[in-house]
């Protein structure tokens, strides 16, 4: 669910964004502050993925040529162009570049001063077992008869979710079960 403040912030920072844009459809994952931009640019600059966006490709080439300032500016511009692009499907080139370079993932939005569990024994298992889950995959894990297998499955879910695009409901579950 998109909150009014997130929408207002998205429109303020990206005034040319359409209602059907990637920036609105995934407003919780839009990069907004300087620290987030710097963090994502650091990840982008070591990327080896096949970049589809012309502006992001140009940013990558500038980085390879040693012009980091121009690369940062082009990176931010390229992401803003992607935010303004019409969202059609998750298979689109724009969505792929958004997911890989221009979005915040669940781990980016984790609770401060917490780290992701590094082994299944660190999971918040008791909290997980006592909770009701709005995500079917978590209910399936919870209903597992063998607790050891269920913990393995939850640990795998945590690893997988850490890389997914930030959505409040998923990040909320991640924060409860996957952080120590």
Image: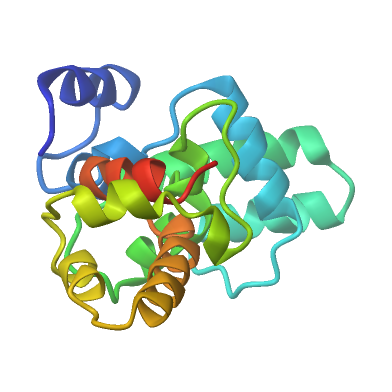
In the rendered image, the vertical position of residue 107 relative to residue 60, given as above or below: above
In the rendered image, the vertical position of residue 101 relative to residue 8, given as above or below: below
Viewer-proximal residue among 27 and 70: 27
| Rendering quarter of residue 134 | bottom left
Viewer-proximal residue among 121 and 85: 121
Residue at 69% in and 63% down:
47
Q: Position of residue 94 (x, y in %)?
A: 36, 62
Horizontal side, residue 177 vs residue 179: left or right: left
In the rendered image, the vertical position of residue 60 relative to residue 29, given as above or below: below
In the rendered image, the vertical position of residue 143 relative to residue 75, given as above or below: below
Viewer-proximal residue among 143 and 84: 143
- Figure quadrant of the N terminus: top left
| Rendering quarter of residue 12 | top left
Q: Position of residue 57 (x, y in %)?
A: 61, 61
In the rendered image, is residue 81 in sight? yes
Horizontal side, residue 121 vs residue 70: left or right: left
- Figure quadrant of the C terminus: top right
How many callouts does the rendering have? 0
Q: Position of residue 176 (x, y in %)?
A: 36, 42
In the rendered image, is residue 84 in sight? no
Residue at 44% in and 61% down:
158
Viewer-proximal residue among 82 and 46: 46
Residue at 57% in and 34% down:
114
- Residue lying furthest right in this view? 66
Q: Position of residue 28 (x, y in %)?
A: 29, 37
Residue at 22% in and 24% down:
6
| Rendering quarter of residue 38 | top right
Question: How was the colour assigned to the protein in this rendering?
Answer: rainbow
Horizontal side, residue 170 vs residue 99: left or right: left
């Amino acid at each position: 669910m998109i909150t009014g403040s997130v929408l207002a912030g998205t429109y303020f920072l990206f005034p040319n964004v359409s209602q059907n844009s990637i920036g609105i459809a995934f407003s919780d994952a839009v990069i907004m502050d300087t620290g987030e931009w710097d963090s994502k640019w650091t990840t982008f600059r070591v990327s080896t993925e096949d970049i589809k966006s012309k502006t992001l490709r140009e940013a990558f080439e500038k980085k390879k040529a040693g012009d980091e300032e121009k690369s940062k500016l082009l990176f931010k511009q390229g992401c803003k162009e992607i935010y303004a692009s019409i969202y059609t499907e998750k298979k689109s080139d724009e969505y792929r570049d958004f997911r890989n370079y221009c979005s915040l993932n669940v781990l980016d939005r984790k609770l401060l001063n917490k780290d992701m569990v590094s082994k299944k024994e660190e999971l918040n298992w008791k909290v997980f077992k006592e909770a009701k889950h709005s995500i079917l995959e978590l209910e399936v894990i919870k209903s597992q008869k063998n607790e050891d297998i269920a913990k393995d499955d939850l640990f795998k879910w945590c690893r997988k979710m850490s890389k997914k695009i930030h959505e409040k409901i998923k990040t909320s579950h991640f924060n409860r079960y996957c952080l120590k």
